[in-house]
Image: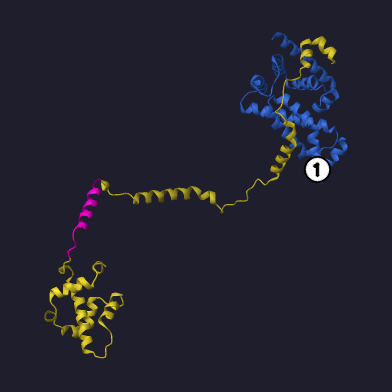
Chain colours: A blue, B yellow
Amino acid sequence: MDDKLLVAQLQDKRTLDKAFRNLMTQYKERLYWHIRKIVINHDDADDVLQNTFIKVYRNIHNFKGDSKLYSWMYRIATNESLSFIKKRAKSQQIESEELQQQLVNNLEADVYFDGDEIQRKLQYAIAQLPQKQQLVFNMKYFDNMKYDAISEILETSVGGLKANYHHAVKKIEKILTQA
Amino acid sequence: MTTEELKHIAAILAEIQKKGSGFKTPDAYFDEIENIVTSKLFVATLPKDSGHETPDDYFKEVESSVLSKLKNEQNSSQDQTIPAGYFDNLEDKVFARLAQEKKPKVFSLKKYWIPAAVAASLLLFVTIYNSFAKKQTLQLTEVEAWIEEGNLELNSYEIAKLYTDEIENININTTLDAYDLEDYLNDEISEESFYN
C-alpha cells in the first residue's frame, strides 16, 4: 500500500484501527530484526517492538510526512532500543557497552540463537564498537540498506555513514582475525 | 561498499555475511504481534483510577485509629487473663463438684421455714376463706395455678400486711402438723422454686 494513503488512513479516526493493523503487518519483521540486533535477546526485542508500535499509534497524528513513514518508524524503533539498553544498564549500574557485551556473552545459552562459533564472535566484535558504528554496521552489513535510507533514519550524512561503516568493518575484521 | 570491496578489505566478514546474524524467533512469533499490540493499546485506554475514594482526612487519622485499636485489643486481652494457678487445681474442683452432685438431696424444712410458713398461711387462708364464703366458686387448684403462674406479685411481707387480721385469727399449731406440711411441700412445690 502506498505510504501516503496509509498515513491518511492512520490519521483518520474512522480508519485508524484497520490501517494500523496493516501497518504492523507490513513492518513487523523488518522492525523486529532491526531491534533484535541492538538488544540481542528475543524477549527484550519483543517488548521493544510492541512499545515501538504503541508509540507509532500514539504519535501518528504528529507525523508530517517530512520523511518516509518507514524511516520515521525505524527512528522510533532505534530510539526505543537504545533507551531500553540505557535503562537496563542503569538499573544494573553499568555502562551500556558493558551490558551489550554481557548480552552477547549470553548468546551461547540463548535458545533463540542458532549461530555457530564465528557468528557468535561476530556479535561479540560488533558489541565492542561505538553505538553509532554498531547501528550503521548492522543496517548495512545484515540488512543491506541503502545509505540514503540509513541517513534518513539516523539523521547523519551519507558521507559520515560511509566512514562509520568503513571503520566498523576494519575493527571487526581485526577482532575476528585476532580471535 | 560492495561485496567485492568487502571481500577485499575484510575477507572473513564477507564469508560470514552469507550466514546471516544467527538470531531466530520462536515459531509463529510474527503471527500474533498485531493482536498483542492491539490488546496492549486497549489496556492502555482503560482508566488508571479505580474510582474508590476515602473520607476526608482519612489518611491523617489512620495512625491514631490503628494505635487506638491496638490499645483496646491489649486491654481486652488483659481482661481475659485468669487468676494465677487457676489450672493447677481445676481438676480437683471439678471432681469436688461432681461428688457433691452425686449426694442424695436432703430437703431441710428448717432452711425454708419462712417461705413454707407463708405458703402454708396462704393455703390455710384460701381454705378457710373458701369454706366460709359459700358464694366463692374458685377451686383451690385454680388458685394454686394462678399463684404458680406468677400472677400474685406480692411478697410474703406484703401478704402478711394485707391480711393482718385474717392471719392473726389463724392458729397454725392447731390445724397443721409439721409432717403434713412437709409432705405437702414435697408433693406440691417444686424444688427449683426455692432457688429462684
Q: Secondary structure at mark 1?
A: helix
- Res. B15 in view: yes
- Res. B152 in view: no
| Image position of B123 with respect to B55: above or below | below
The chief SS type of the magenta part is: helix
Q: Quadrant of the C terminus of chain B?
A: bottom left
Residue at image position (28%, 87%) is: B137
Image quadrant assignment for residue B41: top right
Does residue B37 appear left or right of residue B63 in this picture? right
Does residue B104 appear left or right of residue A34 in this picture? left
**What residue would you read off at disc 1?**
A16
Callout 1 crowding tier (Cα within 10 Å): few <14, some 14–19, many ≥20:
some
Q: Nearer the viewer, residue A1 or B98?
A: B98
Q: Nearer the viewer, residue B176 or A81?
A: B176
Find residue A74 and report its horizontal and vertical position in percent: 79, 30
Q: Is residue B93 magenta?
A: yes
Find residue B92 and report its horizontal and vertical position in percent: 22, 49
Residue at image position (70%, 31%) is: A46
The residue type indicated by label 1 comes to Leu
Find residue B1 and report its horizontal and vertical position in percent: 84, 16
Q: Is residue B46 magenta?
A: no
**Magenta-highlighted residues:** B88-106
Q: Nearer the viewer, residue B148 or A9?
A: B148
| Image position of B84 with respect to A66: above or below | below
Image quadrant assignment for residue A84: top right
| Image position of B2 with respect to B30: above or below | above
Does residue A150 appear left or right of residue B136 in this picture? right
